Image: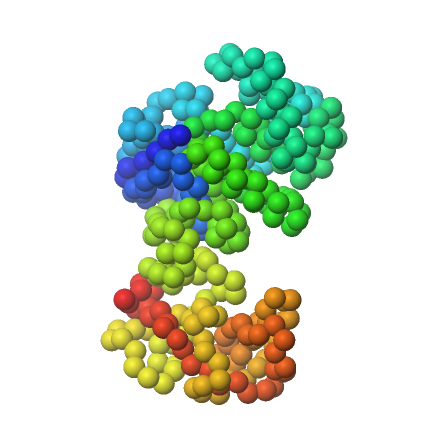
């Protein structure tokens, strides 16, 4: 188990600033998800902690001790990349055993066998243990890659979109398993994803990155219910938050407000002003309504068995909306 602290970390690649004076504390035993688009600095953050890259300025601490200059092995971290990192000439079993046979660990063979068996069953690859890595599908190779990290039981797991190549059912199963493994072990896990469902269901904390800057850090509920900006609000929520002109609806809005943010549950139906249904999406447990309101498009949700159809009128009004200023910052 380990607490991770990034203190004023800056990293450049040529003229590009990948991390810009980032300070972040990842609590011991937490499951932290980093969110942001490509180029936001998510993978670079993992590489700072793993030792694959060193910061140009600032420091990185694990359990209060600076780790600058230490090798990845000395840091006792395990990293899972988005790309497969397997030895193609070895079998699945040998790939899983490989980290445990390091001279630094000196793991008894009986314990190796037990760990490989347990991890392969969790990842649903036990029947592939004697196959060469080259005989596996892409999803199976990624599961082996995840397994190589899990067998080690390091202080810190670093995972860079590890489930992105898996099919939907297996991805859902492994979300549950990874969260269970992390919770039971108490180890710190830092996880990069573009998947909002993964972030909301797995994380104890979410860090939102934008162009190398950390713009918000908190629990999934906190980031969802109290975003600090339009950018942060847009990182979570399906359907996405509706961003509209602040004066679009009747009623008062704060001074200097330029935009109003409405998540689906922040749009009341049955009272207010007329909106026109432009599309109805039935998703089983809910129905999404696409509406046209004063020449603006917005999306909300309604009863799964709604009789509403294209062209019908529904009255709407905002409920406890978010307001943002000209720069997109939240007005509280």
Percent across and percent down for residue 49 are 39, 32
In the picture provided, is 134 more to the left or to the right than 303? right
Percent across and percent down for residue 108 are 56, 13
Q: Quadrant of the C terminus?
A: bottom left
Q: Is residue 280 above or below residue 192?
A: below
Percent across and percent down for residue 61 are 31, 30
Observer-nearest of 203 and 15: 203
Q: Residue at x 67, y 39 (%)?
A: 139
Residue most toward the front?
A: 184
Q: Residue at x 38, y 51 (%)?
A: 219
Residue 194 visible, this orientation: no
Q: How is the image coloured?
A: rainbow
In the picture provided, is 5 more to the left or to the right than 298? left
Percent across and percent down for residue 6 are 32, 37
Observer-nearest of 199 and 121: 121
Q: Is residue 85 above or below residue 71?
A: below
């Amino acid at each position: 188990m380990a607490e991770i602290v990034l203190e004023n970390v800056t990293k450049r690649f040529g003229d590009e600033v990948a991390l810009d004076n980032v300070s972040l504390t990842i609590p011991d035993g937490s499951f932290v998800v980093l969110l942001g688009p490509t180029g936001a600095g998510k993978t670079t953050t993992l590489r700072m902690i793993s030792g694959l890259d060193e910061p140009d300025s600032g420091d990185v601490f694990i359990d209060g001790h600076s780790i600058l200059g230490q090798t990845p092995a000395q840091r006792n971290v395990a990293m899972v990349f988005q790309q497969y990192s397997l030895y193609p000439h070895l079998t699945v079993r040998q790939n899983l055993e490989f980290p445990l046979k390091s001279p630094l660990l000196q793991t008894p063979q009986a314990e190796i066998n037990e760990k490989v068996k347990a991890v392969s069953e969790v990842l649903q690859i036990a029947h592939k243990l004697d196959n060469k890595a080259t005989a596996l599908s892409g999803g199976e190779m990624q599961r082996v890659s995840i397994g190589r990290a899990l067998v080690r039981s390091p202080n810190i797991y670093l995972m860079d979109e590890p489930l992105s190549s898996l099919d939907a059912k297996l991805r859902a199963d492994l979300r549950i398993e990874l969260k269970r493994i992390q919770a039971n072990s108490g180890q710190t896990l830092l996880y990069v994803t573009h998947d909002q469902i993964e972030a909301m269901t797995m994380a104890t904390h979410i860090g939102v990155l934008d162009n190398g800057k950390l713009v918000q850090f908190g629990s999934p509920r906190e980031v969802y219910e109290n975003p600090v900006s339009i950018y942060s609000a847009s990182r979570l929520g399906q359907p996405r938050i509706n961003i509209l002109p602040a004066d679009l609806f009747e009623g008062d809005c704060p001074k200097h407000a330029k935009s109003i943010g409405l998540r689906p549950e922040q749009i009341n139906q049955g009272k207010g002003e007329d909106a026109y249904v432009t599309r109805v999406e039935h998703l089983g447990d809910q129905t999404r309504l696409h509406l046209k309101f004063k020449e603006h498009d917005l999306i909300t949700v309604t009863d799964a068995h709604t009789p509403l159809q294209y062209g019908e009128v529904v009255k709407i009004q905002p409920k406890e909306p978010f307001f943002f200023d000209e720069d997109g910052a939240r007005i509280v």
